[in-house]
Image: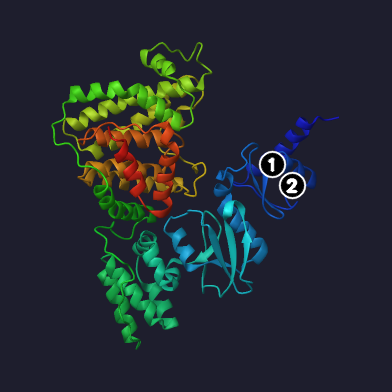
């Protein structure tokens, strides 16, 4: 007779077969797993019920952890709605614009338009819910290529989005406006619907982002068709700058976030010192802080490290082929030290006159290589794992923010470094350099350490001191980054770093 462990292993093999064919396992009843396997995996914590009869893959001992749900959210929504409504459903215009603009944050409540809707709420996991709105579908349905959810086309979503959307989420709205290659499709929708008020709103919106020709073309067409169009700017502010159009939504979003957040950073951060930077003195200060910095930075990431371990790898009394070969924490600590040495070299280049953004652009790949080289030396990682940006999705534990897909990273990172290179204020380079690097999450692992290295490179070369984020402030640190990612509010993160300045 099989033991319980053997039975669970057998069920896990069936689950793995599903995971090998799908990025995210979403199960409906016993369609994909028989009742025995389903019940066993649910009991042992390998599955989690979302609503009655619907399950996602999970992990035992992670009760209360939202990560499984947030990473499976869009796959669940697509399959659940397809099963329940067939093709007779769509996201709202506003939620469609979010996805078109690259904003994949898990909403607290998703609203589904459905001609047969009952206006009822279905409770989902961790306080999220689905509202089944009785409403007409858009004239054209667009299926999201990655998530499979049904939504408005970009043009129709811009026409039918509510006026409040432009004020409440100006970054997503402006990103979508900037994605419009020409206004032909918008012309047709406005003309057929006779939507003079909506036309006036879009004319004002395009003019707000500097696309006067597009605004004039819409205005001219509607007036020729006999509509009285009164131009109205739906935004509450103007933007200082925006990327040329048409652009990747991710590039436009980064440019808009930087433009919106930089003044907030300057207003909430102390002025830099005007004293000349002496390179020898600066390097000594960095060396003096290394042990403390390594302890806290690695502890924030969840590694169990000690001062003794850090000093051991720093002094060279460490050999991955002998006693520490299987000591993962020692390998991580050694990698942090090697990366720290590479960062010091970059700092020296900046002090000698190299543009800070250019120096980090040139060198950050080497920082990352050094961070993980001990893992390769120990045979735990393949060399390809530490070269170049990620080629798969990544997720941040417990965060509603989903980093952009790996293909978008190739567009986003050059834009990120252009922003760093152009920025004159060192505090903005430090705060937004950290935040937007972690927002993009370009690597499979180590993004937090890389973000803090970038922040401290900008601080230490810009008239500030290398600043350590204590592990005791980890919750506040993570909450501040989450608020910036989800709400676009950088105030808490800026103030946290300002308070920690030595």
Image spot of residue 425 (x, y percent): 21, 44
**The N terminus: image quadrant:** top right
User: Quick one: which residue is furthest to the right in this view?
Assistant: 1
| Closer-to-camera residue (429/365) | 429
Determine the image quadrant of residue 209. Answer: bottom left
Secondary structure of residue under mark 1: helix
Asked if residue 424 lies left or right of residue 325, the reply is left
Q: Can residue 122 be seen from the camera position used here?
A: yes
Image spot of residue 292 (x, y percent): 36, 24
Asked if residue 345 lies left or right of residue 437, the reply is left
Q: Are the residues flagged by discs 2 and 1 in contact, CB closer than 8 Å?
A: yes
Callout 2: 10 Å neighbours few (<14), some, many (20+)?
some
Decide: is 446 above or below 423: above
The residue indicated by pointer 1 is: 15
Decide: is 116 above or below 442: below
Decide: is 65 above or below 163: above
Q: Earlier in the sequence, mark 2 or mark 1?
A: 1
Callout 1: 10 Å neighbours few (<14), some, many (20+)?
many
Looking at the image, which residue is at 45% across and 20% down? 306
Decide: is 322 above or below 90: above
Looking at the image, which residue is at 34% across and 68% down? 182
Determine the image quadrant of residue 230. Answer: bottom left
Secondary structure of residue under mark 2: loop
Image spot of residue 227 (x, y percent): 35, 86
The residue indicated by pointer 2 is: 33
């Amino acid at each position: 007779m099989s033991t319980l462990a053997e039975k669970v292993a057998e069920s896990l093999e069936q689950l793995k077969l599903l995971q090998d064919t799908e990025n995210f396992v979403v199960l409906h009843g016993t369609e994909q797993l028989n009742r025995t396997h389903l019940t066993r995996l649910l009991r042992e914590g390998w599955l989690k019920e979302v609503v009655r009869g619907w399950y996602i893959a999970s992990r035992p001992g992670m009760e209360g952890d939202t990560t499984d749900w947030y990473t499976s959210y869009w796959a669940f929504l697509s399959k659940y709605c397809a099963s329940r409504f067939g093709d007779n459903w769509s996201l709202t215009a506003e939620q469609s614009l979010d996805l078109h603009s690259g904003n994949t944050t898990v909403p607290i409540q998703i609203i589904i338009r459905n001609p047969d809707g009952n206006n009822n709420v279905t409770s989902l996991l961790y306080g999220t819910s689905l509202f089944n709105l009785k409403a007409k579908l858009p004239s054209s349905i667009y299926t999201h290529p990655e998530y499979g959810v049904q939504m408005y086309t970009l043009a129709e979503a811009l026409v039918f989005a509510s006026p409040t959307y432009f004020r409440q989420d100006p970054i997503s709205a402006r990103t979508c406006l900037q994605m419009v290659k020409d206004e032909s499709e918008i012309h047709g929708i406005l003309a057929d619907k006779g939507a003079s008020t909506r036309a006036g709103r879009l004319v004002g919106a395009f003019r707000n982002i500097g696309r006067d020709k597009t605004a004039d073309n819409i205005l001219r067409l509607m007036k020729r068709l006999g509509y009285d169009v009164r131009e109205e700017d739906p935004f509450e502010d103007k933007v200082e700058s925006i990327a040329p159009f048409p652009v990747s939504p991710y590039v436009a979003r980064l440019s808009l976030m930087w433009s919106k957040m930089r003044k907030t950073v300057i207003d909430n951060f102390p002025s830099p010192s005007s004293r000349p930077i002496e390179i020898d003195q600066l390097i000594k200060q960095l060396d003096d802080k290394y042990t403390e910095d390594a302890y806290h930075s690695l502890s924030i990431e969840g590694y169990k490290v000690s001062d003794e371990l850090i000093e051991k790898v720093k002094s060279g009394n460490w050999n991955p082929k002998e006693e520490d070969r299987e000591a993962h924490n020692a390998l991580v600590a050694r990698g942090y030290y090697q990366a720290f040495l590479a960062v010091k070299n970059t700092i020296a280049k900046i002090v000698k006159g190299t543009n800070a953004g250019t120096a980090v652009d040139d060198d950050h790949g080497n920082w990352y290589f050094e961070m993980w080289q001990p893992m390769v030396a120990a045979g735990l990682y393949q060399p390809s794992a530490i070269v170049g940006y990620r080629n798969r999705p990544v997720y941040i534990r417990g965060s509603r923010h989903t980093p952009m897909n790996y293909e978008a990273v190739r567009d986003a990172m050059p834009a990120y470094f252009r922003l760093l290179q152009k920025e004159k204020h060192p505090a903005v380079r430090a705060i937004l350099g950290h935040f937007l690097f972690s927002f993009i999450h370009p690597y499979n692992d180590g993004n937090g350490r890389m973000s803090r290295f970038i922040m401290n490179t900008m601080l230490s070369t810009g008239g500030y001191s290398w600043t350590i984020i204590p592990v005791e402030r980890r919750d506040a640190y993570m909450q501040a980054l989450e608020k910036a990612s989800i709400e676009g509010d950088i105030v808490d993160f800026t103030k946290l770093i300002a308070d920690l300045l030595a």
